[in-house]
Image: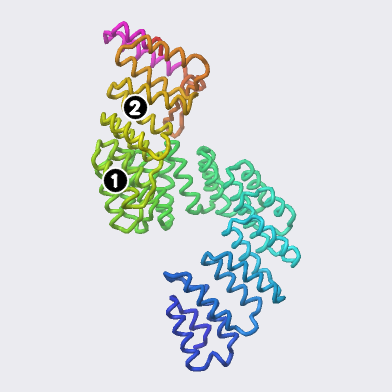
Amino acid sequence: MTLNNLVKQCKTIKQIHQIHAHFITTGLVFLSPSHTLKTILYAITTLKSTPPSIANLLNYALSVFNKVPYPSTFCYNIIIRAHTLFSSPLNALLLFSQMRSLSIPPDFHSFPFLLKACSQLSSHSLAQTIHSQAVKSGFVADLFVFNSLVHVYCVFLRLNDANKVFDESSYRDVVSYNTLIDGYVKARDVGKARELFNTMPLRDSVSWGTLIAGYARCDQWDKAIQLFDEMMELDIRPDNIALVSALSACAQLGQLDQGRRIHDYIVRNQIRVDSFLSTGLVDFYAKSGYIDTAMEIFESSQDKNLFTWNAMLVGLAMHGSGKLSLVCFSRMIGAGITPDGVTFLGVLVGCSHAGLIDEARKLFDEMESVYGVSKELKHYGCMADLLGRAGLIEEAMEMIKNMPMGGDVFVWSGLLGGCRLHGNVEVAEEAARHVMDLKPEDGGVYKIMADVYANVERWEDVVNIRRSMDSGKIKKNAGCSFIQLNGVMHEFVAGYSLHPETDEIYFVLNGIRKHQLESFSINPEIIFFLILS
């Protein structure tokens, strides 16, 4: 069996070591040292399983490289690729500098590896230097180099530079377009991404999936679903990015039937449900109110990662299943998955809704000391909400005072909500002052304080709060709701009368209100409060 065939069968660095040792001890390495060492060097960069010590691997690769007599451009490309592959970009660029000092010319394979090293170093200036080298060497016209240049400028969000490179070349393929579209999406400019998408002479599933993901990322859920439907009508097989983005849009818009059709499509076409897709399905069903279905998909998934566990934990929290979220968290730790901030947020919210105070305290205390997860404002906000709901106002205040950073709107709002529940006017006023200072234009805090004062019958303070709200300086966030009937999505926004059947809807609502007023005896002071509100 030839050396090429031997190294192709190597799956571990140990096997490469054995072959290398065999060729040295038998003297075969000296028959064709250049070919033998180049083959072994190439095998190192194509390993399917990465060894635990990357530093040792790169040192071994360099030792092999340094023994190659008269290394060629091909050898330098291999060793540069190895350093970019295993995240050692600075050494990759130093090797290129060495290569140039020895007057060894680069080829069209060299520049994509070097540009990748620049992106790993987050160095826009180095990328420009490599760009100029590619121009001098005459390789910018090469499609592989050209696409790498567009990509590296998109990584740095230098969309003008990426667009300039794109426009100057007549050698574009679908990858060129997809790369620039992805750059616009990452810059959250889906308008430009759509314009470019519309000019593409040929689109593939990546083109569609990238733009659908862009719409979803920018909360343009309806456009994401519309584009997904267009894709399906053209019989283009969606990739997992398109499927997950469409499922996310369905969850946000409450389009349960559409999401179920996507799930049915996945089953019918025997699409492999990897961790990414199973996470999307769990998230969709949990947000759509079908937590049991979400759990079934979660349990059947053979490829769970951190995001899959987090989706399940957040779903359980949304449904108030605090005890189940704790069980899920224990299973996650037992499975060897390292939690992150989202994990703890999900469990803490679940504990808050279920009133599991002691369990939440324990997890909150262990976040940094046991799991090495930094406490963020959102975790403090969750604990303030939990303690406030439980009536532990003083403990919540003590926690906020001891925070390493100042409390934000959500922390103080969590405490304020607890004060409203338990009638603590004094602390509510302090919490409200902080919220008003941090976000003076938000009308939510004024509504809560109006409720707090009304609950203790301080009607004069209610009137003052209402007058502050009507001053025009306070932003009143309009409530919005969706309902799907007979396949049609209806949107209702508070204060707007854009629905075609508004008159009929209000006729029924007024009839219900009239019936309620006739059926119940209402305190005159409450009527006064209702009129003011």
Q: Secondary structure at mark 2?
A: helix
The image quadrant of residue 18 is bottom left
Residue type at mark 1? Leu
Q: Are marks 1 and 2 in contact (CB under 8 Å)?
A: no
Which residue lies at the image location 45% right of the left edge and 82% below the top edge?
Answer: 17
Which residue lies at the image location 33% right of the left edge and 41% below the top edge?
Answer: 290
Give coordinates of residue 43: x percent, y percent. Answer: 52, 77
Which residue lies at the image location 28% right of the left edge and 30% below the top edge?
Answer: 394
Q: Does the magenta run of residues contain 521? A: yes
Tell me which numbered mark, 1 or 2, is placed earlier along the sequence: 1
Task: Determine crowd level at label 1: few under 14, some 14-19, many 20+ residues with C-alpha closer than 10 A.
Answer: some
Taking 363 as reference, is 79 left or right? right
Of residue 90 and residue 444, the one placed in the foreground of this image is 90
Which residue lies at the image location 57% right of the left edge and 79% below the top edge?
Answer: 65
Q: Does the magenta run of residues contain 465? A: no
In the depicted structure, whether residue 242 falls above or below residue 418: below
Residue type at mark 2? Gly
Of residue 449 and residue 431, the one placed in the foreground of this image is 431
Taking 245 as reference, is 323 left or right? left
Q: Main secondary structure of the magenta part?
A: helix
C-alpha span from label 1 to label 2: 22 Å
- Number of labelled discs? 2
Q: Which residue is mark 1?
A: 363
Q: Secondary structure at mark 1?
A: helix
The image quadrant of residue 293 is top left
Q: Which residue is mark 2?
A: 417
In the depicted structure, whether residue 8 falls above or below residue 301: below
Which range is magenta?
Answer: 503-529
Give coordinates of residue 216: x percent, y percent. Answer: 51, 42
